Amino acid sequence: MRALVVVGLLAVVALVFVVVAVVRDTQGKGVAGGCPEDAPLADVRLRERKDVRINVYNATDEPGLAKKVADEFRNRKFQVKKEGTAPKQLDDVAVLRYGPKGVGSAHLLRAYFLDNADTQFDMERKDDTVDVVLGSGFAQLATTTEVNQALGDLGAPTPPPGTCPMPVNK
């Protein structure tokens, strides 16, 4: 009989903890809460590869690099819109250029460069496409395992300074 009382008491305590946790849960509530009404909204959803649109540009003296890397991205199910040559050389691994609608996509792409790509956020950019500019420091895209590890290290996408996260329902 005593065991039933203890089990019953534990069940009640567990139920109280569950109710308190559900009531205090703030996930998904007002993601843009606390932001000024006129603040630009950044899409911080981590995109699936098939939903990421990119342009690939070669900023090196290696002929055909943009096409080669664009084909690698296509094989990984990204939507490659353009490929070409950048107007000036770049010594870095890569630069990712994007606007508020491309924040989540750029975050995913950072993992493909093991977070060694510089990012350039443009508040005025209206599309969700990310420009991938390859520099002379580029060697290869990360493997699937490396990408998954890098995403874990990067954590969730965050809105750039001066923006607020777009509510999930938009």
Image (cartoon, rainbow, N blue to C red):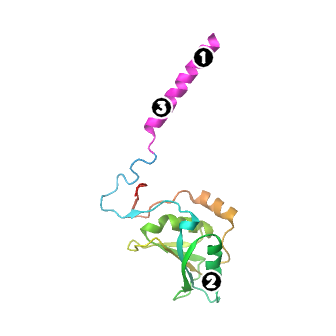
* Residue 154 lies in the magenta-colored region: no
Residue occupying the point 41% across, 74% down: 125
Q: Bin the neighbour count of mark 2 within 10 Å (Cα to Cα): few under 14, some 14-19, many 20 and up.
A: some
Total number of numbered labels? 3
Compared to 129, does 164 lie above or below?
A: above
Residue 162 x, y percent position in the rendering: 38, 64
Q: Secondary structure at mark 2?
A: helix
Name the image quarter holding residue 1: top right
**Mark 1 sits on what residue?**
6
Along the line of sight, the residue nearer the viewer: 84 or 74: 74
Residue 23 x, y percent position in the rendering: 43, 36
Residue occupying the point 61% across, 78% down: 70
**Mark 2 sits on what residue?**
67
> The residue under label 1 is which amino acid type?
Val
| Gap between marks 1 and 2 measured at Cα | 68 Å
Compared to 44, does 31 lie above or below?
A: above
Q: Bin the neighbour count of mark 3 within 10 Å (Cα to Cα): few under 14, some 14-19, many 20 and up.
A: few
| Magenta-tinted stretch | 1-26
Quarter of the image with the C terminus in it? bottom left
Mark 2 or mark 1, which is nearer the start of the sequence? Answer: 1
**Residue 19 numbered mark, or none:** 3
Q: Main secondary structure of the magenta part?
A: helix
